Image: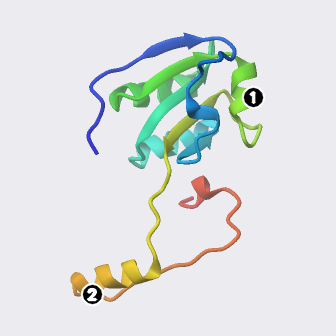
Amino acid sequence: MQKKNYEADVRDHGHRPDSKKEDTDASLSKIEGRNAVMEAFRGGKTIDRLFLLDGCKDGPIRSILREAKKTDTIIHFVDKERLNHMSETKKHQGVIAVASAYAYASVEDILARAEQRMEQPFIIMLDSIEDPHNLGR
């Protein structure tokens, strides 16, 4: 996937009727909270858009902002009401990242790929994961 060659610094207060699909698009994955968002950047996750609490300039937020600028992520500065509306967990800590959803593979696809590579397949199956963004912790 090719990186974007632009950066937007958008100040957006409140909801607009022509608002983009960030609140409802099922093909997107929201990452909420300072640590989760920072780990997503550090782990190489492609973040499409970043929503930051307008006026918040503490150390962790500045670090997240630096990482976002390195990867040409579109940055939106929004008010707390907008973040609360977007948040699924209500624990956003002033930051929500929107990333493309994971591409899932079937067990058959995994086995076929291992066979093509002439490797032994290694599969871990997990159930009832409450916060998949903390899976690697």
Closer-to-camera residue (34/110): 110
Q: In the rendered view of the protein, which quadrant contains the N terminus?
A: top left
The residue that label 1 is drawn on is: 84
Q: Amino acid at mark 1?
A: Asn
The crowding category of the residue bearing disc 1, from other C-alpha atoms within 10 Å (few below 14, some 14 to 19, many at least 20), is: some
From what the image shows, is residue 57 above or below residue 111? above
* Quadrant of the rendered image containing residue 113: bottom left
Q: Specify the quadrant that holds the C terminus.
A: bottom right
Identity of the amino acid at label 2?
Answer: Glu
**Vertical comparison of 26 with 71: above or below:** below
Q: Quadrant of residue 126?
A: bottom right
Instruction: Give percent across and percent down for residue 64.
Output: 49, 30
105 versus 113 height, above or below = above
Q: Name the residue located 46 percent from the left edge and 76 percent from the top edge.
A: 106
* Farthest-out residue, left: 117
Residue underneath mark 2? 115
Q: Residue at x 53, y 60 (%)?
A: 136
Looking at the image, is mark 1 or mark 2 earlier in the sequence? 1
- In this picture the colour scheme is rainbow
Measured in 3D between alpha carbons, the distance from the residue under mark 1 to the one under mark 2, in whole angstroms, is 46 Å
Q: Where residue 11 sits: x, y (%)?
A: 55, 10
Which type of secondary structure does the marked residue at label 1 adopt?
Answer: helix
Q: Position of residue 118 (x, y in %)?
A: 22, 87
Which residue shows up at 47% across the image and 65% down it?
104
